[in-house]
Image (tube, rainbow, N blue to C red):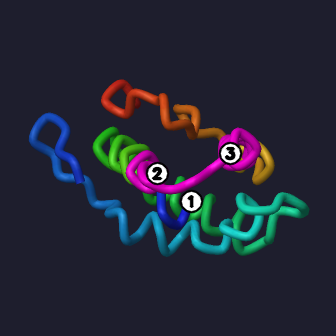
């Protein structure tokens, strides 16, 4: 789900592309699909992505990439809850909820 999950903000281009998002979060697919223990490489990817997304444009782009990935695929509330809980499970705080309803343009 997250694997399938660059806009500009005030003239600044995002440096974190959807390709980077997919690459960093691909180890999370098994967890988001079936639950269980969060793989260490998944948390490493979440952490790496969070550290890379230091600007508002980057954070908004990561959010949009995640939302884009969710569109057009089948998922359940269970999968969404697992995805939304990943940052907390990995001990990371992000400034928005991972959800199809998140307004990425409001992400700071």
Mark 2: secondary structure: helix
Q: Quadrant of the N terminus?
A: bottom right
- SS at mark 3 in the image: loop
Q: Which x, y percent locates residue 45?
A: 61, 67
Residue 22 versus residue 87 in the image, above or below: below
Q: Is residue 72 magenta?
A: yes
> Hey, which residue is sitting farthest right in the picture?
36
Find the magenta span and give its range: 66-85
Mark 2 crowd level (few <14, some 14–19, many ≥20, 10 Å Cα) = many
Residues under labels 3 and 1: Cα distance?
13 Å
Would residue 14 appear left or right of 108 to someone viewing this image? left
Of the numbered discs 2 and 1, the one sitting upstream in the chain is 1
Would residue 87 appear left or right of 56 to someone viewing this image?
Answer: right
* Residue bearing the label numbered 1: 2
Residues at discs 2 and 1 in contact (Cβ within 8 Å): yes
Neighbourhood count class around disc 1 (C-alpha, 10 Å): few under 14, some 14–19, many 20 upward: many
> Residue 61, position in %: x, y?
33, 48
Residue under label 3: 76
What residue sits 51% from the left and 60% below the top? Answer: 49
Q: Which residue is mark 2?
A: 66
């Amino acid at each position: 789900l997250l694997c399938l999950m660059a806009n500009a903000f005030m003239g600044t281009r995002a440096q974190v592309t959807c390709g980077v998002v997919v690459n960093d979060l691909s180890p999370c697919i098994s967890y988001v699909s079936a639950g269980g223990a969060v793989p260490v490489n998944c948390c490493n990817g979440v952490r790496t992505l969070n550290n890379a997304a230091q600007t508002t444009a980057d954070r908004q782009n990561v959010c949009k990439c995640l939302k884009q990935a969710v569109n057009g695929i089948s998922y359940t509330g269970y999968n969404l809850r697992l995805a939304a809980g990943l940052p907390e499970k990995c001990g990371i705080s992000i400034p928005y909820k991972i959800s199809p309803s998140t307004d990425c343009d409001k992400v700071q």
